[in-house]
Image (cartoon, helix red, strand yellow):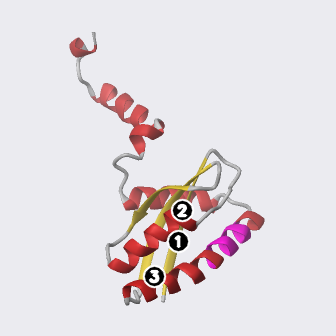
Amino acid sequence: MINNLPFSKFNSTLITLFLLANPVFANENMTFSEAYKIAETTESKMSDHTKDKLTKSQGEFLVKSVISCINETGEKPNSFSLVVKFNAQGNVTETWKNQSSDFLNCFESETKEKYKYISGKKEFYSFIKVNL
């Protein structure tokens, strides 16, 4: 039985690896910093052509959504970051933000509802980093 197994550093490491490898458990409590590192690593491995495609996609979305959220909230942030996770169909399934404000809550909602990006992978992490 599992209850009778001695809890060792080795067992702890195995459990941690299992939880990180299993997306159901890994994403549940992921912090912004952890999600950002995944997105940064993912984007650093992209070809120039794919990076250009992603940058164009983000730019088109940002223009509409930033203006919409400024108009909706009356806030104009100096900077913000948002990590997004896409599924294979290009839908945003999760987000992580570096701060909280009415503007960023609006932007996060817009992202979940309107931003699409098909990467060709089962899941794909990306980040949006803006300095206004």
Which residue is labeled 2 in the image?
A: 40
Give the residues drawn in magenta, as a range.
51-59
Q: Where's the N terminus, which quadrant?
A: top left
Residue lying at 38% horizontally and 28% vertically, measured from the top left: 14
Q: Quadrant of residue 63?
A: bottom right
Check disc 2 and give the amino acid type: Glu
Q: Nearer the viewer, mark 3 or mark 1?
A: 3
Residue lying at 23% horizontally and 23% vertically, measured from the top left: 7
Assess whether mark 2 and mark 1 are in contact (beta carbons under 8 angstroms). no
On screen, residue 29 above or below 49 = above
Which residue is labeled 1 in the image?
A: 128
> Which structural element holds mark 3?
helix
Residue lying at 66% horizontally and 48% vertically, measured from the top left: 121
Q: Nearer the viewer, mark 2 or mark 3?
A: 3
Number of marks in the rendered image: 3
Q: Residue furthest top?
A: 1
Q: Nearer the viewer, residue 93 or 83?
A: 93
Q: Residues within 10 Å of mark 2 (few under 14, many from 20)?
A: some
Check disc 3 and give the amino acid type: Cys
Check disc 1 and give the amino acid type: Ile
Label annotation for residue 69: 3
> Which structural element holds mark 2?
helix
Which mark sits nearer the N-terminus, 3 or 1? 3
Label annotation for residue 25: none
Q: Magenta stretch mostly in which secondary structure?
A: helix
